[in-house]
Structures are given as structure tokens and as C-alpha cells.
Image (cartoon, rainbow, N blue to C red):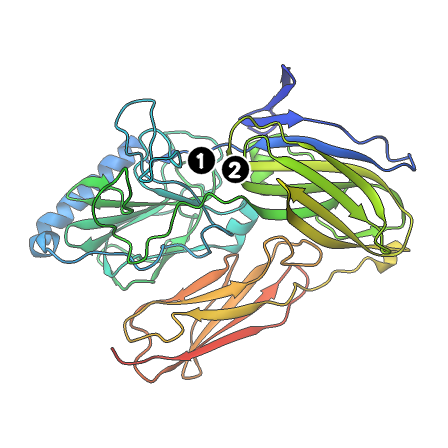
Amino acid sequence: MAGSAIRLHGGIAILGCFLAVVSSVPAAAETREPSGGLVALVEAPELKDSIAPDQLAEVQAAIAAYAKRNPARAGKDEAYSYSFFPQAGILGRDLFLNNYTDQDPSSGLIRDFDCSEYTYDGHQGHDSLIRSFREQAIGVPVFAARDGVVVQTHDGEPDMNTVWDSRNRANLVVVDHGGGYFGWYLHLKRDSVAVSPGQVVTAGTQLGLTGSSGFSDWPHLHFETQKDGRWLEPSAGPCRPGESLWLSQGPVLRDFYVADFYLARGEISIPDAETFFLDETARTATFVKGVETVGLRADLRNLPAHATVHLRILTPRGKVAYEDEGMFENPVLDHLALAVFAFALNLDAVGTWRLQAEINGDLAVNVPFRVVATTKQVKNRPPNRITARLSPSKPVEGQVLTCEVQTSLISEDPDFDIVSYRYEWRINNRVVRSLTSAALTDLLPAGMAKPKDRVSCRVVPADAKSLGKAAVAMTMVEAQ
């Protein structure tokens, strides 16, 4: 998709598989009068994924051979449920569950378990998206959703695909979770698969890292549940009656939110999907006094149709330096959208300025940025302070423990840098797990902590140049 030409048709520019609605373009930066506004609203490509036909046949053959070798386990009938989603991160924040299974067998028609459109035709699993290849490079773990036995793995395939190509083979793990149920974990990062066929795993064991390998066009986890050779939807609702397989089933996340945000010097160019995912634009929240073009990118989730936008830029004294309002020209709800703005501004006062954006009347962005007198005063700042918490707060033996970082998606870092998190788990002050992740959660597998054990999770945020302050959460494990 790189280098896709822009074609204009009825006021709409098509950027490869991107759909961009072009609005006002800022005046030349030499002007002293503030100007600018929306450059483009980009409808990001809706995720699609699958598994290459030859690889599908291999996995099915491996499962059949495994079931033949283990007839007692394959046929064992037991209660079955999931207590957590098997990917690091928080659904509706740094993760976005864009596709459930398609409950409408008719070709060309779609319907998720809740009778809405968070799926695509023929889809057989749950697709949870991370935000970019920059997060993929840091690492976003994928975990076993339940205890089980590893049946099949595959690794070594390219993991940065942005084109839906059925010839691409995926890095994957398939686990027998008991009772005839199998979990399929697809599109993993190359060289990240951490388990082997025949290995016994407990719930929360890290299987690999999130990627975009195989038949995939967005870095994500495809998590599929199969029973007796057929896929099924674990969530229950009006279009999938029966019992839910989730111990605590969450709703379809339909609320609008800003998943990521940054400012940059100059206009931000995103001509194609590869540029969107690589996200290599230099971010900043510090500008030198004078006339400058300021770029803005906001990654949007669940943008309502014809949403309104009202932008303000305030000087250090609170005076309005720029203000504009209008409407995004999206005719329908956009699950995944990207808004790009540019402003030619006279940054005539040193100090802390502020950018505010109201979307549909609600304040969605309210961030400070600095104006300094000289380039020597442009300095990197460490990530903003975080807090951490453990869930459940009073765990019992055998439970998976989640360590959750609490921070802002918009201002994790005062310079809008990509932030990584170093998680260090200790049991009775002994380190039992440590890793660097882009995700807002990490898991301690079931069974690692025993009754009366003291468990702690220490998290240190970092950007490319500096460390932030650590946050620690602690608890004691109780007997069942």
C-alpha cells in the first residue's frame, strides 16, 4: 500500500484502502494570523483476517492426530468458562475489540452476538487490535485463556502485514483447553511463540506476542474458540442465545473515545496504511517561539456519524489564540478513524499553552504544550506519573492476577512519546516474572502464588530517553 496515489472523487480522497474526507488546509506558515483546521478524516481500514487454506488444513490435521492420541482428554465433559481476555491491555482503551463472530450465515450480511455490526462476513473469532507497529515492536503479550495442553505452534513468518493476502501463513498457537474445546491464537509476532506442542500450560501463561502475521491487515490477536471441530461465539446475547462462556461478560464497547493523540512540527502526512501503522512521525509538545505550523493526529474509536468538532488553542494567559468548529463528514459510525489537523500559529508567548477539542459537545482532549525561547530549551521529559493496581485485590489460590496501569491514553507522556512499561512481579520478594510491554496490563499465571504468599507488581514507565517513576501494587494470596 505504500505510495498509493490520491484520487479525488466528489470531494473524497481515496488513499489506498484509506478513506479521507478533506477539509480546510492551513495557510502558509509565514502568516501572523492563526489559521488551519481539519486536513483529513481518515477511515482506517477495517480489520480482516483469516488463516491460509493450507495452514488451516495442517492445524486441523494436528488437532485430529492429537485427539486420536488423547481420546480421554478430548472427550472429557467439564464446565467451561473464561475469566479474562487472553491479551495484555485493557479492552476499550489500548485494545479495541473490533470484530466478534458473524452470527448471520447469509453471504453479504453480518450480525454479531448483540445483533449489531462489530464483525464482518463469515468471521469466526474475536479480533482485538493494538494501536500500531510501534507498540508491536515493544511487545504486547498473548496468554493462555485457560489451563490446557499445547497442540500446535508455528513461528518464523513475517509479522507486519497490512494487506489481506490468503497466501501468508500466520504465527500461531493452538491449545486444548479441555472438554472438547480448543483455543486458537493467531497472527502472533515473529519469533515470539514461547510454548511447544505437548507442553502443559496454566491460565495466564504467555504464549507469544501480538503481531500481524499471516492473513492479516492490522496488528492484533485473533482469538477463536472451537468445540468438536466447529467455531463458536463465547459471548451470549440476543443473536447468540444460551449461556455465556465468560465468567463476567462485558458489553460491546460502543462509546466514543480518543485512543491516541499527539502534536508534531509541521503537517502530518499519512498517505497509506503502512505509514499509519508504523507511526514514525516525530512527536512533540514543545515548540520554539515564533510562527510555526503545528500538526495534530487523533486516533478515534466509535466516531458517531456526522460528529461535530470544536477546537480551541489557548495562550499561557488563557486567551483564545485559535478557535474553529465544524463537522466531520463521516456519513456513518466509524469504528476506526483518524483525524489529522494542521494549524499555522503565531506562538508569540513563552509558557504553557493548551489545546482543547470538544467532539459532539464533550471535552475529548485537553492537553498542555510548551513554547520556549530557543531550541536549546527543547528537552525530553519522562512519562507522567502512573498508578498500579492488582485484580482481584484479594486473590485466592489458583487465580490469575492482573496488574493494571492507570494513566491517560492521551497524555501518558508530557511529550506525547510512545510509552513502554517494565513489569516486575515478585512473590515473597523473589522475582518470578519481568518483561517490557506496550500494554496497560500484565498477568501472573495461575498457580504461581500459594496461600499466604505476598505478591507485588512494580511498574516503571519509560519513553525512548528516560524512565518515569515506579508504581507498586501489593496483595496477599488467600486459601480457597
Residue in the foreground of this view, choosing between 44 and 322: 322
Q: Which mark is residue 47?
A: 1
Q: Which mark is residue 413?
A: none
Position of the C terminus, as image quadrant, is: bottom left
Does 27 sit above or below residue 433? above
Q: Are marks 1 and 2 in contact (CB under 8 Å)?
A: yes
Q: Amino acid at mark 2?
A: Leu
Q: Secondary structure at mark 2?
A: strand
Residue 473 vertical placement versus 335 (above, below): below
First in sequence: mark 1 vs mark 2:
1
Across and down, in percent, residue 81 comes to: 24, 56
Q: Report whether 104 appears left or right of 208.
A: left
Comparing labels 1 and 2, the label whose residue is closer to the camera:
2
Q: Is residue 5 visible?
A: no
Give the SS element for disc 1.
Answer: loop
> In this rendering, is residue 382 above or below 263?
below
Q: Position of residue 339 (x, y in %)?
A: 64, 37
* Corner quadrant of residue 126: top left
Whether residue 196 sits left or right of residue 433 in the image: it is: left
The amino acid sitting under disc 1 is Leu
Quadrant in the picture for the N terminus: top right
Q: Which residue is mark 2?
A: 336
94 left or right of 72? right
Residue beneath the point at 75% across and 34% down: 37
